[in-house]
Image (spheres, rainbow, N blue to C red):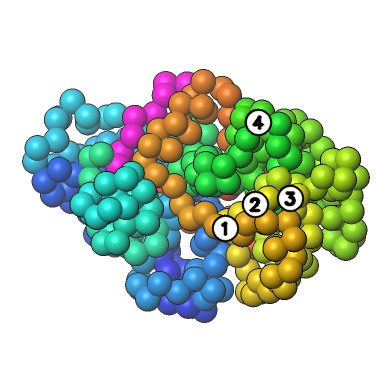
Amino acid sequence: MRAVRYHGPGKPFRLEDVPVPQTGPGEVRVRIRAAGMCHTELHFESGLLDLGVAPLTMGHEMAGEIDQVGEGVNSSRLGERVLVYYYSGCGECGWCRRGDENLCDALKAEYGFFNDGAYAEHIVVPARNAVPLPESLSFAEAAPVGCGVTTALHAIALSRLQEGEVVVVYGIGSVGYGLVQVARLRGARVVAVGRTQAKLDLARELGAHEVVNVAEGAGDLPARIRDLTGGRGADVVFELVATRDTMEASTAMLAKRGRLVFIGYSQDAYTVHPIHLVINEAVVTASVGNTLKELKEALALVGDGKVRTVVDRSLPLEAWEEGMKALREGTALGRTILTP
Ligand SMILES: [Zn+2]
Ligand SMILES: [Zn+2]
């Protein structure tokens, strides 16, 4: 089968022929129909994210149908339309027992990070990782739930968001659209911040109460956020950009007991004088990935039409370079989907 693979930091991805994986006991094979392209792949490409595993098939957002079942898996699942959960925890450590599989001490697999992922025609995963899709969702609409929407749900849970609080979503893309919609559902006042007016317009359409374009720079952003909130500032800031300028602004706009939640990262380090945190009892925290329970919740929200995924375009697998270019240049309005 064909797969787009990573070959180590700083080396270009390559479209290659690899063997079709076969199921073992308790596993299913998914014929991948839609794979979302995430910023994470840019971090692999640039070498910022180097997990030491190569070659590796990229991608961790995928939907498709089950085309093979291993021993012990009910054959009635053949043909089932599914979304793949990309972590496979040990099931035994303290984190897994609490349901925090994304922090597992002994991960069995993390598809698209340590194990072959979604930019391919097939993948084999444990049967529990293949979650049935609501009828109403196409594969392309469903794929961005796997990382985009589910990561948003996870970050909102960690932020301890309360009804009536002010949320700033700094950086609008697949996770950003998810954050805007879920925060609004939870009763927050939502401000979307970005540099591309079309993405901000879409964020407003999806439920952002205010949008702020910082194409001219983030210098006066904290003052603008305080203006919009009667001087209060942001109770929660989700950082999806995390460059030096945005991190400075994100910290300066925090309300008393505000929470700055890192989801994205760049080459830049975060530096802050503790006084800026101390005087407001501000909290700096971070969010990585999501849990299986959250993926099921996210699928239900999208299936019920309460949250929408945004698909920019669908491309055949061999056009993956066009998708990477759109990611790099930030020209895609929503997710670019590969259809292997
Ligand atoms: Zn992702
Ligand atoms: Zn574990």
Residue 256 marker: 3
Residue shown at 68% from the left, 56% from the top: 281
Q: Mark 2 near mark 3, Cβ–Cβ under 8 Å? A: no
The 10 Å Cα crowd at callout 3, few under 14, some 14 to 19, many 20 or more, is some
Specify whether 206 is left or right of 231: left
Percent from the top left, x then y, of residue 36?
50, 47
Disc 2: which residue: 259
Q: Amino acid at mark 3?
A: Lys
Q: Earlier in the sequence, mark 4 or mark 2?
A: 4
Q: Earlier in the sequence, mark 1 or mark 4?
A: 4
Residue mark closest to the camera, 4 vs 3: 3
Q: What is the CA distance from the residue labelled 2 to the residue labelled 3? A: 9 Å
Local secondary structure at mark 1:
strand
Residue 285 marker: 1
Residue mark closest to the camera, 2 vs 3: 3
Disc 4: which residue: 163
| Residue 109 appears in view | no
Q: What is the CA distance from the residue labelled 4 to the residue labelled 2? A: 15 Å
